[in-house]
């Protein structure tokens, strides 16, 4: 068995673990991009397989591109979710699609002394970026480890601890998926964290005076509340956060940031992430949020069912309307001050700001 065959076998074997690990987002495409294929060829010196097995493992369901389909619909793919799930479509740009995928699979590098897993790069390796596409074996080994630790101790990856992958799915960065970081968090507090990220991503792609430049260190980004998650000692800059290991995306940074925002909004319509009222009110197409969920203690099978293409197809009308409005605001070069009221009072309107997050999920 070749080294890469082993990696693929390991990925396929992960399917058997679906019952024991969480799924925190609508499904994603299992296919690497053409640029990732070239990168892997250079990194590994082997022929890169252009398809993955259908991996339903951990937080990702790499089998059906639901996030990509929803994003294409927001960019005028006026067909069914099935038709718009064709990953070769180009309604949304490749940069926006990369951003939509980023929340679920943020490429990262281990700090020195970390990453002691099979298939992971050695300290000082200049090809050290880890992602599902670029370092599949390492990614799976690391994810399996952090999933077990988070299951044993729900607050293991709060307060900035752990890799970006661990924090975004199990810890303090769960707002990337429109989720609370822990049980008992008020809906207002979770929305505040979501709006911090919304402001950051909007201003990265902004063409107005409120733009946050690519070279700004994350620890110095001028967004109130962001330093709680990226403290002043954080030296990587905005571009590095989104494009590490994938330099071709530096030229599409604005699109990547916007895609990350869209992913977060999409997840807020998934029953495993948040509960919305049955009907909307007023001029806003989005029903208000009743409460947010957190992963800790959540029924994993219920969460998974809420994230499938079938579940998305049942409730995409309001979501696509919301995303089309965000696309329109972007096309019109709206400032954050113009966009915030729409996100706060419509997309993330709350039935009860004091409602506490729970570990429930739609069943």
Image (tube, rainbow, N blue to C red):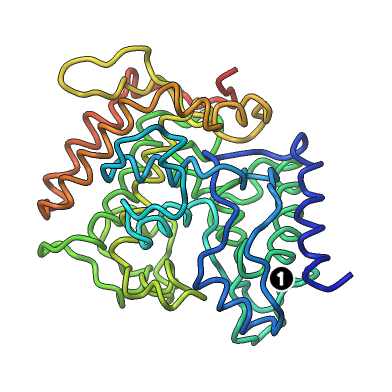
Residue depicted at x 79% and y 42%:
17
The residue carrying pointer 1 sits among few (fewer than 14), some (14 to 19) or many (20 or more) residues within 10 Å by Cα, namely many
User: Is residue 209 rendered to the left or right of residue 63?
Assistant: left
Residue depicted at x 76% and y 34%:
19
Task: Pinpoint residue 340: horizontal percent, then vertical percent.
Answer: 19, 42
Task: Pinpoint residue 204: horizontal percent, then vertical percent.
Answer: 26, 63
Image height check: is 146 above or below 179?
A: below
Q: Secondary structure at mark 1?
A: loop
Residue depicted at x 52% and y 32%:
309
Residue depicted at x 43% and y 23%:
291
Q: Residue 238: name its quadrant.
A: bottom left
Image height check: is 263 above or below 317?
A: below
Q: Quadrant of the N terminus?
A: bottom right
Q: Nearer the viewer, residue 66 or 209?
A: 66
Task: Pinpoint residue 46: horizontal percent, then vertical percent.
Answer: 71, 80
Query: Mark 1 sits on what residue?
Result: 115
Q: Residue 313: name its quadrant.
A: top left
User: Is residue 240 rendered to the left or right of residue 184?
Assistant: left
Residue with the most extreme right position: 1
Q: Quadrant of the C terminus?
A: top right
Q: Nearer the viewer, residue 62 or 253?
A: 62
Callout count: 1
Q: Nearer the viewer, residue 130 or 185?
A: 130
Task: Pinpoint residue 55: horizontal percent, then vertical percent.
Answer: 69, 48
């Amino acid at each position: 068995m070749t080294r890469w065959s082993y990696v693929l076998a390991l990925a396929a074997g992960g399917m058997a673990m679906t019952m024991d690990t969480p799924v925190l987002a609508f499904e994603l495409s299992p296919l690497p991009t053409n640029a990732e294929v070239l990168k892997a060829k250079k990194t590994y010196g082997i022929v890169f397989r252009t398809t993955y097995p259908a991996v339903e493992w951990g937080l990702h369901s790499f089998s059906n591109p639901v996030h990509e389909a929803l994003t294409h619909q927001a960019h005028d793919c006026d067909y069914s979710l099935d038709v718009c799930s064709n990953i070769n479509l180009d309604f949304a740009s490749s940069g926006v699609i990369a951003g939509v995928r980023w929340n679920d699979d943020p490429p990262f590098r281990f700090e020195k002394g970390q990453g002691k897993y099979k298939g992971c790069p050695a300290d000082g390796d200049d090809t050290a970026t880890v992602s599902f596409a670029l370092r599949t074996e390492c990614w799976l080994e690391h994810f399996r480890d952090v999933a077990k630790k988070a299951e044993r101790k729900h607050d293991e990856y709060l307060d900035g601890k752990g890799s970006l992958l661990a924090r975004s799915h199990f810890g303090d960065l769960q707002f990337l998926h429109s989720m609370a970081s822990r049980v008992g968090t008020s809906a207002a507090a979770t929305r505040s964290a979501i709006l911090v990220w919304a402001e950051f991503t909007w201003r990265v792609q902004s063409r107005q005076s409120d733009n946050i430049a690519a070279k700004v260190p994350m620890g110095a980004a001028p967004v109130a509340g962001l330093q709680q998650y990226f403290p002043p000692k954080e030296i990587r800059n905005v571009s590095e956060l989104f494009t590490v290991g994938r330099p071709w995306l530096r030229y599409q940074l604005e699109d990547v940031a916007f895609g990350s925002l869209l992913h977060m909004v999409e997840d807020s319509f998934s029953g495993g992430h948040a509960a919305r009222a049955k009907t909307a009110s007023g001029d806003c197409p989005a029903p208000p949020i009743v409460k947010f969920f957190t992963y800790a203690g959540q029924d994993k099978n219920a969460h998974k069912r809420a994230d499938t293409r079938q579940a998305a197809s049942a409730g995409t009308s309001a979501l696509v309307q919301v995303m089309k409005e965000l696309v329109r605001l972007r096309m019109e070069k709206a400032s954050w001050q113009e966009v915030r009221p729409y996100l706060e009072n419509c997309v993330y309107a709350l039935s009860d700001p004091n409602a506490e997050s729970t570990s429930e999920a739609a069943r």
